[in-house]
Image (cartoon, rainbow, N blue to C red):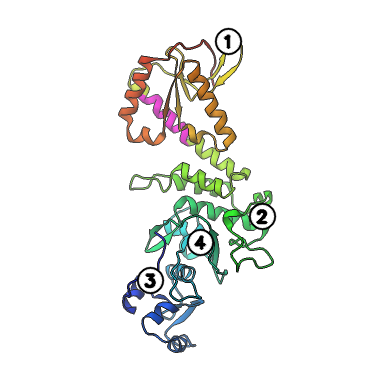
Amino acid sequence: MSYQIPSSVPSLEELARRQQNVITASQLRARGVPSRVVSEHCRRGGPWQRLLPRVYLLQTGTPTPEQRMWAALLYAAQNGREAGSREGALITGAAALALYGFSAVPRLPAVTGVQVLVPRQRRLRDVGEVRIQRTARELVASEVHGLACAPVARAVADALREWLGDTANGDSVNGASANGDTENGAASDDDAELEPAAERALIGPRTLRSLLREAVAVAPGGHPACTTAELIAELREAKLLELPRIRAALDELLAAERESAIGGVIELAAAELLPAPLVGPELRMRGGTFVAVPDLYWPQAGVAVEVDSELRCVSEGEQAWMRSGQHRMEYLGVRVVYLTGGRLAAEPAAVAEELRQAFLAGGADVVELMLTEG
């Protein structure tokens, strides 16, 4: 969902409860509150206060972190020039991760900047702690404590891009250049490129690894916050995989996931009383021509197992290299079983039966291969 100013008109009291006492000028006007009354109430010593342009808090005192999030979201969701316009906005980056409850980022009270994702054509400036980021992609979000937030994978990528990008080139999150392109929306952070200098950003490798692990960790409900594939896609879209620090942390995450999944396959095979497979052997033809390096291989049956092969390599070149090896194995008669960690966890009995059947059937006319154990 993307945040929408409601089309129906609830009472001011109901709307205030829904939005934690944060209200826009257009919402007040729609409920018959004149501008002069708003101005009077926001004077020094008055019962209301102005948080952001055309966004008000209907109480005195310091706003709570959640009220600050509401203010940022409402500021970005409203048009500001056309009272009747209702356009979407999502909280993203570190603020969204804090709302999701990530332990690898500062807790919500410590979050000082709020990244808000808006459609690329929007005409908005950064103001106060609100940092506008534009995207040409459709806004799709999850509701967290009543607030519209970007999906976890997108929020992780945006948080990393802000932390690293600000150090890299000093630009704001909205990608504005020094000549003020922010106002016309010409710049988009989705199109921004991070420079190698971003490697000097003040984010430690331990925090980086923890953030990526937490993004794909299984929640109490039994589902990960995001899939590894979704995380990789967002990091690639943000051009973050070009940074050695990010790539190293991701490679470590993928290696740990694959090691766990491969270990699970070996346990299932042992439970089916199958011989222990070779782990990561290098297969070559008798003349020395390289064939492939499957995750597991039973030479006596001519059966190979590939686990999460699409996540094995991140770049297009690596994926092409991996697929060509799989095609060579199949061409040479090796029976290749493709498994995913998700299916292994969800359907262990079905995977075990598939392994048993593959071993019993074996490969077909397998060319004699030389083996070098990994």
Q: Is residue 267 magenta?
A: yes
Q: Amino acid at mark 1?
A: Arg
The image quarter containing residue 188 is bottom right
From the image, tell me which residue sits under label 2: 168
| Residue 286 tag number | 1
Q: Which residues are magenta?
A: 257-268
| Badge 4 density bin: few <14, some 14–19, many ≥20, Cα 10 Å | many
Q: Which of the numbered marks, if any, corresponds to residue 119?
A: 4
Q: Secondary structure at mark 1?
A: loop
Q: Nearer the viewer, mark 1 or mark 3?
A: 1
Along the line of sight, the residue nearer the viewer: 302 or 255: 302
Kind of residue indicated by mark 3: Gln
Measured in 3D between alpha carbons, the distance from the residue under mark 4 to the one under mark 1, in whole angstroms, is 58 Å
Q: For mark 3, what is the residue?
A: 19
Give the quarter of the image for residue 186.
Answer: bottom right
Q: Position of residue 307 (x, y in %)?
A: 45, 30
